[in-house]
Image (cartoon, helix red, strand yellow):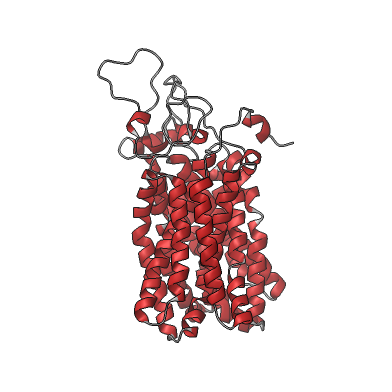
Amino acid sequence: MTGPRAPDAFVHRINRRLFYGWVLVAAGVLILFASGPGQSHTFGVFLTYVADDLRLSHTEVSFAYGVATLAAAFGLPYAGRHVDRRGARRVLTVVSLLLGAAAIGFGFVNGIVVLALGFAAVRFLGQGCLFLVASNVIAQWFERRRGFALSLVWLGFSASVALHPPFSQWLIETVGWREAWLWLGISSWALLLPVLWFIRNRPEDHGLRPDGAPAPEPPGEPVQGAAPPVAQLDSEKPESPPAPAPSRASGKNPASAGSSSAPQTAQPAITGLTLKQALRTSAFWIIAFGLSLIALLMTGLFFHQVAIFQHRGLEVHIATRVFAITAVVSVVSAPVLGRIMDRTPSRLMYAVALLAMAGALGALHLVDDVATAIAYAVVFGLANASMHVNVGYLWADYFGRRHLGSIQGTGQTCLIVGASLGPLPFSLSLDLTGNYSAALAGSAVLSVLLALVAALFLRYPRQPASNPDLEARPA
């Protein structure tokens, strides 16, 4: 047998000391941090400068931003299919080059149409594709520790929330808002292009298995005194989905597990539902609708938080400082929640995320002084962390890894559609009733109802008997 190719040798050299998946976790942190130019917390710094320069109202800029975000969302299923067919590394290469170019080009916008196109490009590449690639890679390399690994990757997003706004403000004050986008584009290239060297699509491509599990033993009589298989050791998850046939593979979902009876020279098959099969399950729509609701509410609360605090009689500086408390709580709690998710039934943790959002809405409704504002910030930080862990975890867990990019891309489209509508219910509540109480109460009730649906009805879909390869082929 010939030796491994050069990329395999690089992976195995590191893997002898440390499971290579943890290298990809570090890469994922950088990828999500580099998504900053495509995120709302960065755009918010530029809002007034762009509006004044282009002689547009804030409403016109916000409308262009919302429409562009919505349009960009519908490109994600296409990006997900390319991740499945060509691999995350190739897609990330293209996205990295285009994101830097789009950020630089954003500094040349000269009207509302070009502004909307610039928004769409940077949102699609930064907010959409980079998250899709990062979460896809981590979901491929981890199964039993997927929740914990994804929670660590989300630290990159939290770091972006903390660092990109002041960095952007400093650039604006130093070189102006247009040249600031030039440096944001260059910084994106500086962060993302070196990461490409470390990205690997699936552990099976390099003779490895998720979580660093040992290769399956060849069939035959067990060796006297040998350790039990990995699947027997993994009792962390009390919930096991139904399977069409008995399986000894590790992991909790048969759609994402491989056969453990393969010879040692062959890797277990990577299985999972196709996009068409996933769309025919109730599980997909329960997950998609619930996560979209959380994304809608998170966007709406971030967008209206200062106005709601002012409406409650609090000063602006209190509202802005609460953002920092929320970010700190999210950073601290995300790894803990990720580890809990690895040990707890997924549907229950998903229900907890919805209940946490309902709790944040209720806490915001009660804000009337500094103490209640801090309490709200803590609950909202927990809701953010729980959302971040669930959104990267559930698609692979319920539908497997074989066609994860297509399924995840479609699911993320639903999330971004929800996020683009986020400010609307709160604005309508204020315009129609004179306060935000109706939106807060109604959203909290809807979150609780969806939590009950998730806890009672969310189940793993059975692996279809049809050949997924045939359904996956383009017509």
Residue 329 drawn at (x, y percent): 36, 65
Residue 429 drawn at (x, y percent): 60, 77
Quadrant containing the N terminus is top left
Q: In which quarter of the image is residue 15?
A: top left
Q: In which quarter of the image is residue 106?
A: bottom right
Quadrant containing the C terminus is top right
Q: Nearer the viewer, residue 406 or 191?
A: 406
Residue at 50% of width from left, 78% of height from top?
172
Residue at 65% of width from left, 48% of height from top?
78
How many marks do you count on the picture? 0
Residue at 33% of width from left, 16% of height from top?
222
Residue 428 drawn at (x, y percent): 63, 76
Residue at 38% of width from left, 53% of height from top?
152
Q: Nearer the viewer, residue 281 or 384?
A: 281
User: Is 338 drawn above or below residue 34 in the view shown?
Assistant: above
Residue 137 drawn at (x, y percent): 48, 45
Is residue 169 left or right of 288 when viewed as pictured? left
* Residue 134 appears in the picture as rendered: no
* Residue 121 appears in the picture as rendered: yes
Is residue 39 left or right of 231 when viewed as pictured? right
Q: Which residue lies furthest to the right in this view?
A: 475
Q: Residue furthest left?
A: 225
User: Is 187 drawn above or below residue 52 in the view shown?
Assistant: above
User: Is 184 drawn above or below residue 283 in the view shown?
Assistant: below
